[in-house]
Image (cartoon, grey):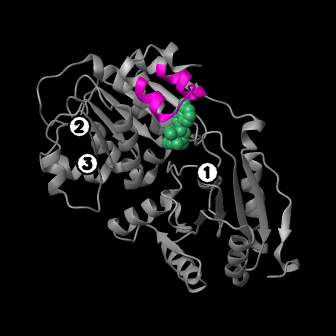
Amino acid sequence: MSFSSLNLHPALLTNIETLGYKVATPIQAQAITVAMQGKDVLGIAKTGSGKTASYALPILNTRLKKVSIKRDRQPKVLILLPTRELAVQVEQVFKDLSKNFPISIKTMAVYGGVSINPQMKALYGVDILIATPGRLLDLKRSNAVELIKVETLVLDEADKMLNLGFEKEMEEIFDLLPKQRQNLLYSATLTDQLTGLNKVLLNDPTIVKIEENLEDDSLINLSGYFVSESKKGPLLRHLINDLKMNQVLVFTSSGHKADKVAGKLNKNGIEALAIHGKKSQSARTNALAQFKSGKLRVLVGTDLISRGIDINELPYVINYELPRSPKDFVHRIGRTGRANKEGIAITFVTREETHHFKVILKKMKRYIDMIDSEEMEF
Ligand code: ADP
Ligand code: MG
């Protein structure tokens, strides 16, 4: 579907064209119309299918029609997401989509790990607030922001936001919001979180679910290697060199392991940085920025960056260690094969993990012919 048939403000259409989007993706085609009517939306579509614009466009379209002259600390739109990196990325999408608007709409991202004072000052006049939960609550406690005027709430990576790790903070935030509001929830994976959903989606939501077909699936080419723990390092280096990988995202299960793997790569002349929750925010920002711009060959990270992070045409993902859940697997490999581009995802599996890996693949309805690294020379 073309964007011009969606009834969007001309300023938005111009910016969409500048971004190079030709047609709306299925989730955009369906969710934008519903959200523009002010209804609640539960949007489910695979990772990389353009969910950000599917809420950003209706939100900006509505804001364009509501000229507010009053500047205060009461955002009209609140977008909650699980990581600082995702907050920054979504802020950029909003900025790109609101260039040269006839009225000024202020979008701002707030997140932890950086000093709070500049955020407190900058919040004055904010219309659209993008936030991670912890920092948002800190800002609220300091009276830097009020949430009573929120008209639209977005939960990006909704299942993650409603899971146990975030539950308490989310409840606290929901209590600060007006009961009458529009709720937009988006996720690639949504299975058994329905009890949590009831708390948020009060108003008979329209469920927009884009089913995947097998053809879509083949955008990510999956392969797997049986490899012992001690051979993982050499196999990783072999694959990076042999396949001449210029940009590869490697996943480990812990920050400690990410540091080790990155260190070993550097020792062997392959430039790598690690990214995980124990790093300083400046180190995280720097590593991701370098990687996104193509200057850094290897980024080794934890599931911190498995959710939502969009790296333009990333060709390779390697699971150095298996994630615990099939859901995490889906999000990790979904960093490649985005926006209709193909990608390759390689997974390392020890013999003891064979069953666990089979369970993951079965859940995904995928099959892999495993390669035995014992029979390889490297
Ligand atoms: P999701 O949130 O579903 O994982 P994103 O919103 O991050 O996906 O979008 C994935 C990529 O697709 C981004 O690089 C984005 O710029 C691009 N994209 C989004 N919508 C379109 C479109 N209509 N046409 C082309 N590319 C698009
Ligand atoms: Mg997303």
Could you say which is closer to the camera, residue 83 or residue 102? 102
Q: Is residue 17 magenta?
A: yes
Kind of residue at disc 3: Leu
Q: Earlier in the sequence, mark 3 or mark 2?
A: 3
Q: Which residue is mark 2?
A: 176
The structure residue drawn at horizontal position 40% and vertical position 33%, both measured from the top left corner, is 200
Q: Nearer the viewer, mark 1 or mark 2?
A: 1
Q: Badge 1 is on which residue?
A: 327
x and y, in percent, of residue 164 in the image:
44, 52
Residue 341 - label:
none
From mark 1 to mark 3, how far is it between C-alphas? 27 Å
The residue under label 2 is which amino acid type? Leu
Q: Quadrant of the N terminus?
A: top right
- Residue highlighted by disc 3: 136
State whether residue 351 is above or below residue 193: below
Stretch of the chain drawn in magenta: 14-32
